[in-house]
């Protein structure tokens, strides 16, 4: 992925939730996730290009972390659950090979 291109990330975070409610969070990010093991059209091995880390924070507190490997498919989809505690921001951060970094956030209102 070109360094000057912002990767497309899709987020699904409920806009509102009741305090104490378990909410589902879903993320998908566009990325080729090249393993570094496949041969290209000319027979040489394609260079590795994967997302290595994903971190999600809720009002600055880490609530989910994942370390990804070359076995993860292109355009990784991650889903997890957390408890709605207070209104604020849920932030997402992906980082990987070749300086790849992406950040997104979503607001949630807790009633």
Image (cartoon, grey):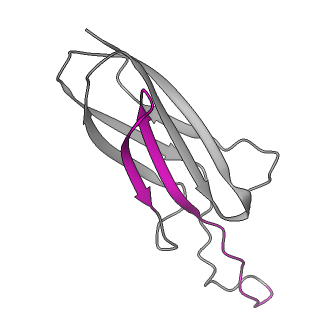
In which quarter of the view is residue 102 placed? top right
User: Which residue is found at the position 49% from the left and 70% from the top?
Assistant: 69
* Apparent side of residue 22 relative to residue 7 in the rendered image (left or right): left
Q: Tell me: residue 74, above or below residue 102.
A: below
Q: Is residue 43 magenta?
A: yes
In which quarter of the view is residue 46 placed? bottom right
> Residue 81: x percent and y percent?
26, 39
> Residue 98: x percent and y percent?
73, 63
> Residue 88: x percent and y percent?
41, 18
In which quarter of the view is residue 93 placed? top right
* Apparent side of residue 96 relative to residue 105 in the rendered image (left or right): right
User: Which residue is found at the position 47% from the left and 73% from the top?
Assistant: 71
Q: Is residue 17 magenta?
A: no
Outermost front residue:
61
Picture quarter with the N terminus: bottom right
| Residues drawn in magenta | 42-67
User: Which residue is found at the position 52% from the left and 73% from the top?
Assistant: 70
Picture quarter with the C terminus: top left
């Amino acid at each position: 992925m070109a360094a000057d291109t912002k990767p497309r990330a899709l987020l699904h975070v409920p806009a509102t939730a009741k305090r104490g409610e378990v909410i589902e969070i879903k993320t998908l990010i566009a990325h080729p996730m090249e393993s570094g093991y496949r041969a290209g059209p000319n027979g040489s091995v394609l260079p590795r290009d994967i997302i290595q880390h994903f971190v999600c924070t809720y009002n600055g507190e880490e609530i989910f972390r994942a370390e990804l490997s070359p076995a993860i498919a292109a355009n990784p989809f991650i889903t997890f659950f957390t408890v709605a505690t207070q209104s604020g921001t849920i932030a997402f951060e992906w980082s990987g090979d070749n300086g790849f970094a992406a950040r997104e956030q979503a607001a949630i209102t807790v009633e």
